[in-house]
Image (spheres, rainbow, N blue to C red):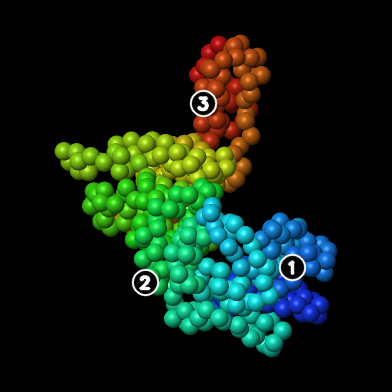
Amino acid sequence: MKPDVKQFATSLVQTLRGQGFQAYLVGGCVRDLLLGREPKDYDVATDATPEQVMRIFPETYAVGAQFGVVLVPVPETDVANAGSGRVIEVATFRADIGYSDGRHPDEVRFSRDPHEDVARRDFTINGMLLDPLSGPVPGEVLDFVGGSDDLEAGIVRTIGDPALRFGEDKLRMLRAIRFAARFEYALEPATFASIQEMAEQIRVVSRERVRDELTRMLSEGHARRAFLLLDDSGLLRQVLPEISAMHGVEQPPEFHPEGDVFVHTLLLLENLPDPCPLTLAWGALLHDVGKPATFRVGPDRIRFDDHVEVGVKIAADICRRLRFSNDETEQILALVDNHMRFGHVGRMKESTLKKFMRMPKFEEHLALHRADCLASHRNLSTYEFLREREKEIPPETMRPRPLVTGDDLIEQGHRPGPKFREILNAVEDAQLEGRLPSRDAALEFVRKEFPA
């Protein structure tokens, strides 16, 4: 986040104060500033009503005015902000009354009291207000809920009764896990106990919101701890029973000395890059999801016959259930489908290897393979070999222009049909292997190998 975004948020506070209203920075941005981190977003809390905010700042989006929230766009004054769509959320102090749907308040009562506004927020570390005009950063902090103490102690605690806070919005249970993992904090005992008691209720939360929260856990650099907490809390069985099923599924120790499939998967998550692309994160989580269903003890060792094919089907069900986009689903399934092919790299023909390496987003496949190795036998020879081949192979030989077309085949007397693809594939393979240096050589190859 560029400093100018913080400056703009501060200017909103200043403008609101100049109009006679209370105004503060609030929530996660205050937490991050106190931790010395750069906030991803800045939020402002004020006693000005949405109508008053929109009158003061005409360029606003009243997307949540009924809940006291308006969005003020950050001016695109430089190249860094051009087309960014960044906004500052300005929320009116309020009290929320009733949560029949487990997400939205039944009634919102605007308030002039910041104490009342903070009392309805989720966690103490997210419930502090900051006056950015009162002096050097971080400025004066208004802390009515003990957030500063919990921040210093490394504790995630709900504001007030945890059952009440989680009852208002069940997604807060997942958010508690994510914050504890991200900051490496402890979950306050009563907060954690309430999550365990209410875990089944996470099912009422929309699949999209669950997906987004899990994606943040997977991609923020603390995925292993997040999933251990999900497991201990009982939430994992509710949101991803297919991952919970990996518990106790033994693996052959000669290939997986680290332990069962669950242990392996969580160790793998620890070796993902930070930040991690969404598709890589989910492909890594689901790469062995077919193993529990295919586990068997053979005469020589434990086996998981067809676990890739089964895993692709299970992963497709999960992607459908969590409503990933078609493009995201395609890449996640490709990662699951191809992760075992790295074991055959040493035996691949040059043409097969080049086709393998030119898969869409091959960097993600390679990153998954590296993490997979580090979570098991730790042998990175195939990874290092492929890295060297990437340097050695010129891009134009990885994806060469076709030497032969369908029109050429028709001219030689071939009739359009399935045979066309076989011939063109054979020509491409020979070209990738360096056996066809020219178009004439390719046409002669077709005449000899595939006479019309």
Report which quarter residue 28 is drawn in: bottom right
Residue type indicated by callout 1: Thr
The tag earlier along the polypeptide, 3 or 1, is 1
**Whether residue 393 is visible:** no
Rate crowding at label 2 as few (under 14), some (14 to 19) or many (20 or more) other CA atoms within 10 Å.
few
The tag earlier along the polypeptide, 2 or 1, is 1
**Whether residue 56 is visible:** yes
Q: CA distance from mark 3 to mark 1?
A: 70 Å
Q: Position of residue 440 (x, y in %)?
A: 62, 25
Label at residue 426: 3
Q: Position of residue 18 (x, y in %)?
A: 81, 80
Report which quarter residue 95 is drawn in: bottom right
Rate crowding at label 1 as few (under 14), some (14 to 19) or many (20 or more) other CA atoms within 10 Å.
many
Q: The residue tagged with tag 1: helix, strand or loop?
A: loop
Residue that label 2 marks: 189
Q: The residue tagged with tag 2: helix, strand or loop?
A: helix
Report which quarter residue 44 is drawn in: bottom right
* Residue found at the very far bottom of the displayed protein: 135
Q: CA distance from mark 3 to mark 2?
A: 64 Å
Q: Nearer the viewer, residue 332 or 35?
A: 35
**Can you tell which of label 3 and label 1 is closer to the viewer?**
1
Label at residue 241: none
Rate crowding at label 3 as few (under 14), some (14 to 19) or many (20 or more) other CA atoms within 10 Å.
some
In the displayed structure, 144 sits above or below 44; it is below
Residue type indicated by callout 3: Ala
Q: Nearer the viewer, residue 366 or 280?
A: 280
In the displayed structure, 430 sits above or below 396; it is above
In the displayed structure, 209 sits above or below 118; it is above
Q: CA distance from mark 2 to mark 1?
A: 37 Å
**Can you tell which of label 3 and label 2 is closer to the viewer?**
2
Residue that label 1 marks: 49
